């Protein structure tokens, strides 16, 4: 069997196995699909409430499209949840075919194996969430950035209007791609079309609800910033505990003087992302190359989105996949170590959720320790990429003096 054939067999095995695990693992790792995606999309199809149009929503408006599309796969009698897994697998297959091509490139083959391994290690939560679709779109967009910057930007913009995080890939592209006008133009066209559609549908008042709703959230239990509060709850410190938010359908932490921390996180996130992008822009001005800058900057921005976020859902770990994939495609000898750390992070995240999650929400030492190590390694990855950006080789832009 050819190398390409082996990759495709592995693709099928991994997706089938992870999809099956969603039904047998504890803590319902595919629960969001049938508890929220299906009701939201069913209401829209029935002409009832359309989230993001008739009411505020935690997701951008385009997120409803794949939720509705999953019903088309479900009509074959497999049900909505299996239909969702089939939809994600189909989109992944398109991105995977574009990634490995004819598998003549060692870098692309290595990147393909890395992606499949990350899917297996992260487990069902990486498949049964909207984030899975945006990862596939992110990979396609990253692969097209140099040759087709308009198309790449439009794909990344569409992904951003499904989940916000691909905005980090777009920001890195604006900094690192020479044809940045095409990147900005492609993203602007898609965003304008979506906003026009939202306004025409009567949702002008909720157009950016997914942003305003996030700023009012508390600290989700898995977020890195929540680690001290989680340890406080574990150690029985007065005023520290884990609770369930019925509005957001997630577990959060509380503790002494937590409100100033909650208020500071969004400005801190914005400041860190802006500073990281400016650092990348400075290095590009000094003459850094796209092949060195884009993977490092996009991974730094994506990891920054996770490390400094009030929300820390386990599926967020799949966000690091597109930067690592493109890094392996372009410079695999420089990216094997970050990719290995990415796989460790994915495996630890699956241990946290769904396997040990009961010990997170009712804190016990093992689960909290594993989560703390995972969060610490995320900080390590962010700092590593920031340092790598600083140390990127640059061309000397100073004018050459004539010999005396």
Image (spheres, rainbow, N blue to C red):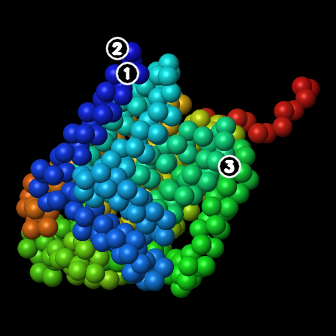
In the depicted structure, whether residue 177 falls above or below residue 181 = above
Of discs 1 and 3, which sits in the foreground?
1
Task: Tell me the quadrant of the picture where the C terminus can be found.
Answer: top right
CA neighbours of label 1 inside 10 A, class few (<14), some (14 to 19), many (20+): few
**Which circle's residue, 1 or 3, is located before the other in the chain?**
1
Give the image quarter of residue 35.
bottom left
Q: Residue at x 57, y 52 (%)?
A: 155
82 left or right, relative to 339: left
| Residue 338 coordinates in the image, percent (x, y) | 39, 38
| Residue 36 coordinates in the image, percent (x, y) | 29, 69
| Residue 378 coordinates in the image, percent (x, y) | 34, 51
Q: Which mark is residue 150?
A: 3
Does dot 1 land on a helix, a strand or a loop? helix
Q: Are marks 1 and 2 in contact (CB under 8 Å)?
A: yes
Residue furthest to the top:
1
Q: Is residue 91 visible?
A: yes
**Which circle's residue, 2 or 3, is located before the other in the chain?**
2
Between 228 and 292, the one nearer to me in the picture: 292
Q: Is residue 223 visible?
A: no
Q: Quote the CA–CA distance across marks 2 and 3.
A: 37 Å
Q: Quote the CA–CA distance across marks 1 and 2.
A: 6 Å
Give the image quarter of residue 305.
bottom left
Q: Residue at x 38, y 62 (%)?
A: 67
Task: Tell me the quadrant of the picture where the N terminus can be found.
Answer: top left
Q: Which mark is residue 171?
A: none
Q: Which residue is mark 1?
A: 5
Q: Which residue is mark 2?
A: 1
In the depicted structure, whether residue 168 falls above or below residue 12 = below
Q: Residue at x 33, y 33 (%)?
A: 11
In the depicted structure, whether residue 55 falls above or below residue 75 = below
Does dot 2 land on a helix, a strand or a loop? loop
Between 267 and 395, the one nearer to me in the picture: 267
């Amino acid at each position: 069997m050819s190398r390409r054939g082996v990759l495709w067999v592995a693709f099928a095995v991994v997706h089938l196995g992870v999809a099956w695990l969603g039904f047998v693992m504890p803590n319902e790792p595919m629960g969001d699909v049938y508890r929220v995606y299906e009701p939201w999309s069913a209401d829209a199809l029935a002409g009832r409430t359309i989230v993001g149009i008739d009411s505020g929503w935690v997701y951008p408006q385009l997120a409803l499209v794949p939720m509705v599309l999953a019903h088309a796969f479900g009509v074959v009698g497999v049900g909505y949840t299996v239909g969702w897994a089939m939809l994600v697998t189909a989109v992944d297959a398109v991105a995977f075919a574009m990634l490995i091509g004819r598998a003549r490139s060692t870098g692309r083959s290595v990147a393909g194996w890395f992606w499949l391994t990350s899917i297996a290690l992260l487990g069902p939560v990486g498949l049964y969430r909207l984030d899975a679709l945006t990862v596939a779109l992110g990979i396609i967009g990253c692969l097209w950035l140099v040759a087709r910057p308009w198309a790449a930007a439009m794909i990344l913009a569409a992904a951003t209007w499904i989940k916000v995080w691909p905005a980090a890939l777009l920001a890195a592209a604006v900094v690192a791609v020479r044809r940045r006008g095409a990147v900005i133009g492609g993203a602007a066209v898609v965003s304008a079309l979506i906003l026009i559609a939202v306004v025409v549908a009567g949702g002008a008042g909720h157009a950016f609800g997914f942003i305003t709703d996030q700023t009012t959230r508390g600290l989700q239990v898995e977020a890195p910033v929540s680690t001290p509060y989680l340890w406080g709850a574990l150690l029985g410190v007065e005023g520290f505990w884990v609770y369930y938010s019925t509005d957001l359908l997630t577990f959060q932490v509380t503790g002494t003087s937590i409100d100033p921390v909650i208020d500071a996180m969004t400005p801190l996130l914005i400041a860190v992302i802006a500073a990281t992008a400016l650092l990348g822009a400075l290095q590009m001005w000094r003459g850094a190359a796209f092949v060195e800058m884009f993977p490092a900057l996009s991974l730094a921005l994506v990891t920054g989105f996770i490390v400094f976020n009030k929300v820390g859902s386990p599926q967020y770990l799949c966000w690091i996949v597109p930067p690592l994939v493109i890094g392996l495609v372009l410079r695999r000898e420089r990216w094997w170590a970050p990719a290995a750390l990415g796989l460790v992070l994915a495996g630890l995240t699956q241990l946290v959720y769904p396997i040990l999650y009961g010990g997170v929400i009712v804190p016990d030492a093992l689960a909290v320790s594993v989560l703390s190590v995972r969060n610490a390694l995320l900080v390590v990855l962010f700092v590593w990429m920031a340092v790598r950006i600083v140390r990127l080789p640059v061309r000397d832009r100073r004018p050459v003096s004539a010999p005396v």
